[in-house]
Image (tube, rainbow, N blue to C red):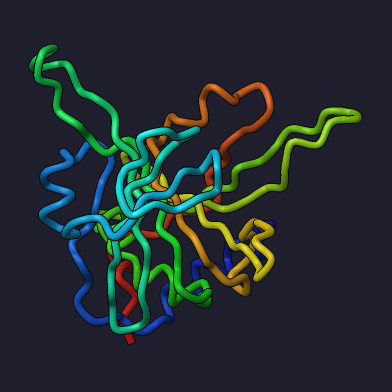
Amino acid sequence: MKKIIAGVCLGLIAAVAPAQQPVSIRIGMSSEDAGAMLGPPTRFYDAGLHAFTQMFPVVYKGPVWECHRRQTKLQEYEVRLQFEADKSISRLHPTLRVSAISILFDRPLKFKEALLDSAEIRRLCAKGCVMQIVHYKGTPGVSYGTDYLRISDEAKTEAVALTYSDDDGTAKPVVSADDPISNIEIESYFSLEKYSEILTVVDAGPISSAQWPPTK
C-alpha cells in the first residue's frame, strides 16, 4: 500500500497545472451562497427512489439531492447538494446550509486529472493536505467494504472521498494512481467517527503546500 501511495504523490507532483477553476463549494455554506455560485438547480434526485424530478418532489423517500451543472475545460460535472437547517441564529428562521456534497463526472478521468480539475480539492490542498487510507477492520464472516483513498486538509476539518463507478453503476474504490475517478464526495473530517467500530483512517503521506498545485 505504501508503494501505491508513493506513486499517487509522485503523480501529483509531476502533473501539469490546470486552467483557472470554478469557485469551490464547501460544507456549511448557506443555500443562498451556493446558489449564487452554481446558479439555479437543473433537477432534483431522490436517492431513495433512484428518480429525478424537475422540481423538489412533494412526496419523496429521500435523501433528496439538489443538482447543479458545472463546466470546466475538461468536461461537465453534476454537483449534488444536501442541506440541513441551522437554528443557531434563529429557531424561527433557520438558515439552510450545505450538509453533503457529491460531484459526479460526465466521464471518468485519470487520477491526476480528476484531482487537478476539482475546485474542492484545490481549496482543500491550498495549504497542504494529507492522503489517507480508509481501512475496514476485518470481522470474521462479515464484509463491510473495500479500503479506499481520501484526501484531508492538514487541519483535519474536511475530507474528500474518491470513488469510481463503472458503466453498470457498480461502485469501485480508488486505491491507486492508475484508477479512474468518476465521483468525489466532500465530508466533514470526523463524519466517519460513528463507524469507528468497523473502520479506521490512516494517514498515508502529506502533500505539502510547496507541491500543490503541481507544476511543470
Q: In this orientation, which residue lies closer to the viewer: 10 or 100?
A: 100
Hey, which quadrant is residue 188 in on the image?
Answer: top left
- The residue most toward the right is 141
**Which percent across, then down, holds residue 23?**
18, 62
146 above or below 192? below
**Which percent across, then down, holds residue 178?**
62, 74
**Which percent across, then down, holds residue 67?**
33, 54
* x 23%, y 82%: residue: 19
On-image quarter of the N terminus:
bottom right
23 above or below 48? below
Q: Is residue 123 left or right of residue 207?
A: left
* x 68%, y 27%: residue: 198
76 above or below 65? below
Q: Is residue 80 left or right of residue 170?
A: left
- The residue most toward the bottom is 216
77 above or below 62? below
Q: In this orientation, which residue lies closer to the viewer: 51 or 73?
A: 51
Q: Is residue 166 left or right of residue 56?
A: right
- The residue most toward the front is 58
Q: In this orientation, which residue lies closer to the viewer: 37 or 207?
A: 37
Q: Is residue 216 left or right of residue 49?
A: left
